[in-house]
């Protein structure tokens, strides 16, 4: 993949060498993300952060990543504050805003909309999530997290990975992109746990099987997480349902707590979630009693998102090899929080 000047729209753009390149650059971003060093390699560059769907982590993570590279961030949130509410097309919006930005990150509730926007943009566009379709940067940070967590356990690579994906697999774009990414590896066992109505799309299941992976589908969580390296939980994507009442039919179906983890999971099974986890009583996918479990990786996962997005910006804007040249030590007080 030619990163410089490219849109990042789909996991399908990446091969294993591309992923290794992203991860190698992400590893080099650690001193900057951890506030040990400061770089101004993107001093003067502008990110257009366009989020037409609610977001906290992804929006702030992209903005933080750009700021940590020395760039400025301009944000648009929600349709009601944009010219789209006045009838402006995605084409016109892209033509205008790409004149104001050096790179654009976009989230949109309609599948395929970010690609449509990118086709008219004059600068690189990154997909921050388009409907139930894809979320490529999330899949990359998820895989980066899996790699780091398994390295701590002495595992050298991702071939032979055993992963369970739990919850809303029909509308969960994070698991869609992650499955596509896993197709690049060997001998992966994927256990898909969901109600029948929220199963992983058949096209993605077939893609996994065509890659030579073992795919198991179940609607029962407890026994299905007994022999996995990763338990990846997802929330019910209420915004994709016709009504909250319909989403409520499935909310709280799969709840992982410390007692269930201790009884069914292997001692080193890593717990992941793309966040936000729904901690309401009627949902509670990951119980708060897991917060002290050292294998709960959800906050390390979120931290890793900044590293991966810094890497994507550095590669897309072709400054990956200039970051250290524009660096200095941090001169303010900073907690050791990483």
Image: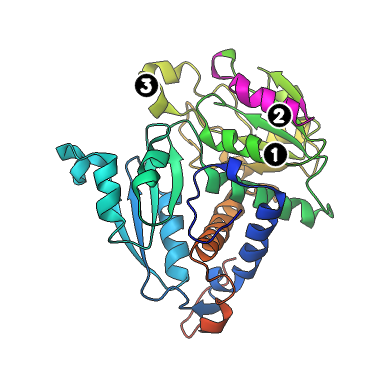
Q: Which residue is mark 1?
A: 182
In the image: residue 244, left or right of residue 267: left
Residue 265 image-quadrant placement: top right
Task: Tell me whether circle 1 and circle 2 mark residues in contact (CB < 8 Å).
Answer: yes
**Residue 184 location in percent, x, y?**
72, 41
Kindly identify the residue that appears in the image at 35 percent across and 43 percent down.
Answer: 117
Q: Which residue is mark 3?
A: 244
Magenta stretch contains residue 199? yes
**Residue range (magenta):** 197-214
Mark 1, other Cα within 10 Å: few <14 / some 14–19 / many ≥20: many
Task: Tell me whether circle 1 and circle 3 mark residues in contact (CB < 8 Å).
Answer: no
**Residue 149 location in percent, x, y?**
72, 52
**Residue 217 location in percent, x, y?**
70, 19
User: In the rendered image of this protein, does residue 41 appear above or below residue 46?
Assistant: below
User: In the rendered image of this protein, does residue 225 appear above or below residue 21?
Assistant: above
Work out whether mark 1 precedes mark 3 in sequence or the reverse, and give the earlier one: 1
Kindly identify the residue that appears in the image at 42 percent across and 68 percent down.
Answer: 67
Q: Which residue is mark 2?
A: 208
Colour scheme of the picture? rainbow
Q: Secondary structure at mark 1?
A: helix
Can you see residue 192?
Answer: no
């Amino acid at each position: 993949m030619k990163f410089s000047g490219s849109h990042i729209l789909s996991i399908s753009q990446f091969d294993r060498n591309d992923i290794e390149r992203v991860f190698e650059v992400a590893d080099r971003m650690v001193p900057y993300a951890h506030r040990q060093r400061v770089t101004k390699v993107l001093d003067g560059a502008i990110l257009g952060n366009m989020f037409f769907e609610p977001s906290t982590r992804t929006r702030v993570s992209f903005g933080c990543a750009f700021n940590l590279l020395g760039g400025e961030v301009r944000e648009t949130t929600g349709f009601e504050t944009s010219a789209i509410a006045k009838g402006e097309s995605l084409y016109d919006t892209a033509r205008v805003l790409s004149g104001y930005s050096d790179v654009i990150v976009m989230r949109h509730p309609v599948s395929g909309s970010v690609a449509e926007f990118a086709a008219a943009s004059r600068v690189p566009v990154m997909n921050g999530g388009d409907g139930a379709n894809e979320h490529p940067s999330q899949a990359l940070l998820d895989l980066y997290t899996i790699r780091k967590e398994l390295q701590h356990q002495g595992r050298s690579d991702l071939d032979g990975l055993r992963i369970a994906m739990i919850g809303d697999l029909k509308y969960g774009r994070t698991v869609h992109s992650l499955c596509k990414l896993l197709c690049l590896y060997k001998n992966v066992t994927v256990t898909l746990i969901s109600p029948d109505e929220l199963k992983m799309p058949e096209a993605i299941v077939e893609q996994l099987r065509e890659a030579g992976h073992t795919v198991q589908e179940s609607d029962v969580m407890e026994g299905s997480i007994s022999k996995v390296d990763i338990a990846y939980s997802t929330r019910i994507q209420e915004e994709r349902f016709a009504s909250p009442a319909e989403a409520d039919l499935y909310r709280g179906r799969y709840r992982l707590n410390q007692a269930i983890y201790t009884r069914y999971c292997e001692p080193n099974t890593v717990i992941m979630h793309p966040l936000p986890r729904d901690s309401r009583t009627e949902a509670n996918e990951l119980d708060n009693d897991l917060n002290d479990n050292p294998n709960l990786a959800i906050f390390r996962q979120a931290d890793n998102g900044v590293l991966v997005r810094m890497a994507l910006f550095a590669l897309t804007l072709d400054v990956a090899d200039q970051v250290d040249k524009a660096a200095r030590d941090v001169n303010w007080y900073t907690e050791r929080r990483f």
